[in-house]
Image (cartoon, rainbow, N blue to C red):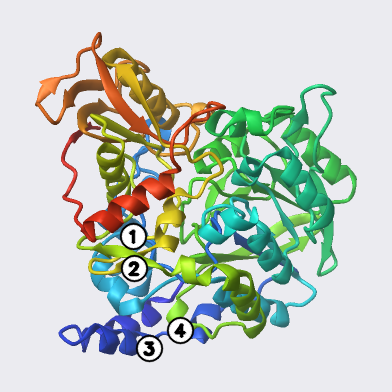
Amino acid sequence: MFTRRDLMRTAAATAILLGGPAGLRRAAAAQALSQDDLLRFDPLGQVTLLHVTDVHAQLMPIYFREPSINLGVGAVKGKPPHVTGPDFLEMFDIPRDTPECYALTSVDFVELARTYGKVGGLDRLATLVNAIRADRPDNTLFLDGGDTWQGSYTSLQTNGADMIRAFNALKTDAMTAHWEFTYGEERVREIIDGELDFPFLCGNVIDTMWEEPVFESTQMFERGGVQVAVIGQAFPYTPIANPRHLIPEWSFGIRPDMVQAHVDAARANGAEVVVLLSHNGFDVDRKLASLVDGIDVILTGHTHDALPREVKVGKTLLIASGSHGKFLSRLDLEVKGGAVTDYRYRLIPVFSDVITPDPEMAKVIAEVRAPYEAECTRVLGQTDDLLYRRGNFNGSFDDLICQALLEERDAQIALSPGFRWGATLLPGQDITVDDVYSMTSITYPSAYRQEMDGAMLKTVLEDVADNIFNEDPFYQQGGDMVRVGGMGYAIDVRKPMGERISDLTLLSTGEAIDPAKSYVVAGWASVNEGTEGPPIYDVVSQYIERHGTVSVPENTTIKIKT
C-alpha cells in the first residue's frame, strides 16, 4: 500500500481542513493523494499478477464500508482476516484518518468517506490495469476471482452481459466463478461458448452423470519467459448456498486431491509458477494450502477480505483483494530455476476521485447502462442513517430489508440472508433503484410468507451459525449470519453445533419464542424451487417510497458471546 510518508502527508493535508466543508476536505485529499501514488511500485522479477474478485457487477464508483465484526474461531481466532477496526490498524501499523484507514476498516467511516470520496468504478480500475500493463507489457496477467456477473440492476436485466462486455474490454486473462452459476446452466454455457473472450476455469466442477469435468481447470501462460499455470477453483458449496435446480447436473466441492492432481499436471507440463485462482474463501484456502503441495500463489475470493499484506502458508502466498472493485492487487514474482525466489506485493485501493477514468471503459459503461439509466438513478427516498451490509451478525441495510419484510408482508419475524455484497449509503444520501438492487438483485428473489414454529427458527439459526463458526474451515460456507427482524437472540460462537443459539425473543411482545408455537415469517432468497412471493427488490422499494425517509436504529437485539 502507501509508505508511511505518503500516509502522513495525506493525513496532514486533510487535517488542515477538518473543520471545513466536505468538498474542501475532499479537494485537499485529492491534491495530496494522486494516481501516481496509487501506481507507485518498484517492479520485481518476470511476472506481474493483477487480481480483482467479488466485483458483484459494480460498474460505477460506490461507497463500501468494511466490517466492524469478523470473528474467527479455533486456530484462526485473532488472525487476519478476523481482525477489524482499531485492532486491524494496530496489527498493520496504519494511522487513523488516513487513506488506508478509510479503505481497510470501518473506523470513522462516514467522516473519512466524505473526505476521500467513493471507491471503485471499472473505468478507474481500467486506468490502473492499463498503466501497469503499459509498464510491464510482456509480464502481466490480469485475473478475475469470480462473483462478477451478479449484483446490480443492469446485470440482472442483461443476465450478466453488461459485466461480460466490461471484463472483455479489460482484456481479462482468466476467471473462476460462483454467483455466475445462478443464471443457470443454459445461460452459463451460452456465455462461455459465445460471449466470453477468455478462459472460464473451474477445475472442481464435475458432471454428475458422466463424472467428467464440466469446465477447463488450467490455462498456461508465458510471461517474461516464465511458464505460469493458472488453475481455477469455483465456490465449492454452490449447490448448497444457491439453488441446486439452476445447475442440477453439476457437482462441486473443495476436492483437495483433484487440486493436487491439477498442480502436478501443470508442473509436469512445464509450469514454473502455479497460481490457484480461487473462490473458496480465505480460511478454506488457508487450510487447502497446507494440504496441497506445489501452489506458489492462491488468489483467494468469496469472503470479501482485503489484506494489505500477503499471508504465507508454507511456501504458498495467499492474496486477499477485497470486493466491489474497491481494490486491485499487484504481486510481482521473481523466478529462478523453475521456482519463485522473491516477491513484492501491494494492495491498491481504487480511490475514484483521484484516478482519471479510462475513456474506452467509460464509453462501455455508458453504453451498457444507457437503456436503464433513468430507472437506475430513480430516487426512491433518503436515509437518515449509514446503510451498509458487512458484519457477522447484522448490517443496517439488512435491518432495513427486514423492516420492509415485516411491514410489507405483514409478518411477525423477518429473515434475510447474510450476503456480503452491496454498496454503502451515507447518512442523508438519496436511495436509488441502483442502491436497492445492489443489495437484492438475484435470480430467485421471491419474498415468501409462511409459518414456522419456534423449533424450526432455532434450527435455521443454528445451521447458519455452524456454516460460519465451525472450527474446521472446510465446513464453512463463507457468508454471515442470517439477518433477523422482529426477533432477538443470543449466540455463543464457542459452543458446538446445536448449542450456539439461545434466548430467542419475539420483540413485539418481549415473550420467549415457544418451540411448539407457529409464527408468521417473511424472508427471501429461498433455494427451494417454486417459492412464491413478490420480488424482494419490489418489496424494499415500495417500503422506501412509502416512508420517503428511512431510519434504521442501532441493532441491539443480538447478544454475542465470544
Give residue 241's position: percent from left, percent from top: 53, 32
Along the polypeptide, which appears first: circle 4 or circle 1? 1
Residue 403 location (% of width, % of height): 25, 43
Q: Is residue 313 above or below residue 90?
A: above
Residue visible at 68% across and 29% down?
Answer: 255
Residue under pointer 3? 32
Q: In this image, 404 relative to 1: left or right?
A: left
Residue 506 percent coordinates (x, y): 17, 26
Horizontally, is 537 left or right of 40 in the view? left
Q: Nearer the viewer, residue 524 or 558?
A: 524
- Check if mark 2's residue and mark 3's residue have beta carbons within 8 Å: no
In-front residue for pair 278/357: 357
Of the numbered discs 2 and 3, the one sitting upstream in the chain is 3
Give the label on residue 354, or none. 4
Do the residues under discs 1 and 2 have CB atoms within 8 angstroms? yes
Q: Which residue is mark 2?
A: 102
Badge 4 or badge 2: first in the primary sequence: 2
